[in-house]
Amino acid sequence: MRPYIENMIESIAAQDDAAAIAKIIRQRRSINFFKEKVPPRELILQAIDLARWVPNHNLTEPWRFYLLSEQCKKKIVDLNAELVTASKGADAGEAKRKRWSSIPGWIVVTCVRSEEELRAREDYAACCCAVYTICMYLWAHGIGTKWTTGDVTRDARFYDAIWTDPDLETVVALLWYGYPAEVPVTVRKPVSEVLVEV
Ligand SMILES: Cc1cc2nc3c(=O)[nH]c(=O)nc-3n(C[C@H](O)[C@H](O)[C@H](O)COP(=O)(O)O)c2cc1C
């Protein structure tokens, strides 16, 4: 094939890729309600593998990914129900237990702690990129996610449940995943409200 035709084909492919990426970014939503079916483990492992390729200052690779077993998930569901019962009453606690029990997939992403403030900040930023990459890859496969950082993720017993020392790592995301039962609608401010040209 002549070079200019090759270049043209590559450029069309790149445009298609860019459009596909833009569509995934715009259409992804945080999912509150999932279908029962559990997505294939292989896809989750692929998403985690991909997440390691996000930008990361000094290549500290600060992320740790935890895939939760049913037993581990139950501990967190129980703990959350207990916390909600204590703050909002037994009915609210039971409602949470029911809803959380029905969530099919659970990942926890943590960030290795650093004593150095700037490094801790940059490592957290890199971990957020990693979480988002998981969300995007799964969304591209029709799998929804929800990133949560509720009170339960700061409880010492949460760290016990995932066999992690809170002095060494901090939870960045409790990430639920599954096939969406419904996809919410949301909005963003116009670009003009957030864009500053200096
Ligand atoms: C760091 C972080 C923490 C979040 N924690 C929660 C949470 O605890 N509970 C919750 O309902 N949503 C949580 N979310 C999801 C946001 O509420 C959601 O992204 C926002 O409503 C925009 O909706 P969208 O993701 O569908 O665009 C979190 C998102 C991020 C990035």
Image (cartoon, grey):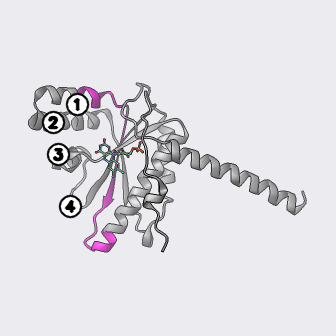
Q: Crowdedness of circle 1 by 10 Å Cα count: few (<14), some, many (20+)?
A: some
- Within-10-Å neighbours for mark 3: few <14, some 14–19, many 20+: some
Amino acid type, mark 4: Asp
- Magenta residues, start to end: 97-120
Residue at the disc numbered 1: 96
Question: Which of the two discs, 4 and 2, labels the residue nearer the N terminus?
Answer: 2
Q: Which residue is mark 2?
A: 84
**Element type at marker 1?**
helix
Mark 2 or mark 3, which is nearer to you?
Answer: 2
| Residue 114 marker | none
Q: Nearer the viewer, mark 1 or mark 4?
A: 1
SS of the residue under disc 4: loop
Helix, strand or loop at label 2? It is helix
Residue 63 seen in this snapshot: yes
Q: Report if residue 111 lies within the magenta region.
A: yes
**Which quadrant of the figure has residue 38?**
top left
- Which numbered disc flags the more N-terminal residue, 3 or 1? 1
Q: Amino acid at mark 3?
A: Arg
| Identity, as a three-letter code, of the amino acid under mark 1 | Lys
Per the image, the residue denoted by label 3 is 157
> Is residue 48 something one can see in this rendering?
no
The residue under the point 75% across, 52% down is 12
